[in-house]
Image (cartoon, helix red, strand yellow):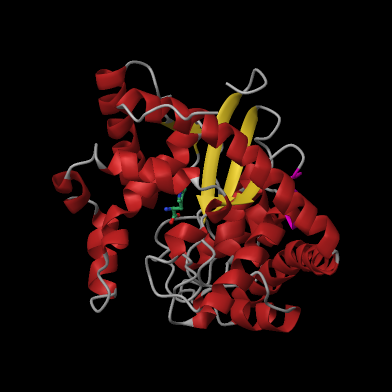
Amino acid sequence: MINDKKVLFSGMQATGSLTLGNYLGALKNWLTLSDEYECFYSVVDMHSITVRQDPSVLRKRARALLTLYIAAGLDPKKNCIYYQSHVSGHAELSWILSCFTYMGELNRMTQFKDKAAKHADNINAGLFTYPVLMAADILLYQADVVPVGIDQMQHLELTRDIAIRFNNLYGDVFTVPEAYVGKVGAKIMSLQDPDKKMSKSDENPNGSIYLTDDPDTIVRKCRRAVTDSQACIAYRDEQPGIKNLINIYCACTDTTPEKAIKEMEGRGYGELKTAVAESVISILKPLQDEIARLEKDKTYLDGVIKENAQKANYYAMKTLRKVQRKVGFPDRIR
Ligand code: TRP
């Protein structure tokens, strides 16, 4: 608990261009949480180097992601928005936790297997121990809840196992985190392959709407979206392309599928696509304007980065010192 509130931790990687799916699926929901929880939102740049990065690109993208958090409406006075690499406690706790994690556990992680197959030329130890660093992220702040997508659930389960194991040995050190189950974000699928999630690593750029796409590009991508030959606007699994377009429309206009279907009654797919494109532009244009405004205000952003890193460090160190004592590291002489 911090300030009588439960603690929430989440993080995003600054790799690839962020998509509408990242925004509608995750970020937008974060906005509603800061009243109820003490929130830590990290730009997890240390996770990013498990695959090879161009340093200047990583630095730019990390800053762009942090800017996006704020532009999306997360108040950096209420939410701790910071770079993982600015808080050395993540690495220090990660080392300790790695001594309480079994090879067998890490070997079972499906994301490791996927990534190892994808980056066969660079299967480094960091890629393997990635879930331990993620556990450290979460446990360092004694997080009660973690909003994660289904693809990160296995990592969260491992985090819980590590926390419980540690607590059994040393007493109540860590809060055992739960997956955040609240209003779940819209699940946005690829425009080109509606059975697949819209992803920043999609090879086909027409499948994803990027947060930086201009209106013309958005219109073009929506027009090219894969649909079906049923010529009927309905919200059902047999029409995954149409269902996805309706989901995007609903998330952008804050409406329900039932209402959207009513609005679209008797119209063709072309009109639906136009309406979807307009709804996306109405969300992304103000976001892009706000990002541009913030980018110009270097002093403000740098101030946020500095203050929030200090805040994160403060809470991180509290946990880290406790853990170091528990495992038997000598006290520091002041
Ligand atoms: N591994 C997560 C992802 O790729 C990002 C992440 C790192 C994270 N540390 C976290 C998410 C802690 C939630 C909590 O999406």
Is residue 304 shown above or below 197?
Answer: above
What's the residue at 48%, 69% (across, down)?
190
- On the question of residue 233 being in view, the answer is no
**Residue occupying image coordinates x 25% and y 20%:** 169
Up/down of 324 relative to 232, above or below: above
Residue 182 horizontal/vertical position (percent):
54, 33
Image coordinates for residue 48, horizontal then vertical, percent: 45, 64
Quadrant location of residue 121? bottom left
Membership of 42 in magenta stretch: no
Determine whether 160 is above or below 5 in the image: below
| Residue at far front of view | 333
Q: Is residue 231 left or right of residue 32?
A: left
Q: Nearer the viewer, residue 316 or 53?
A: 316
Magenta stretch? 71-76
The N terminus sits in image quarter: top right
Q: Which residue is drawn at 50% across and 48% down?
A: 88
Front position in the image: 47 or 28: 47
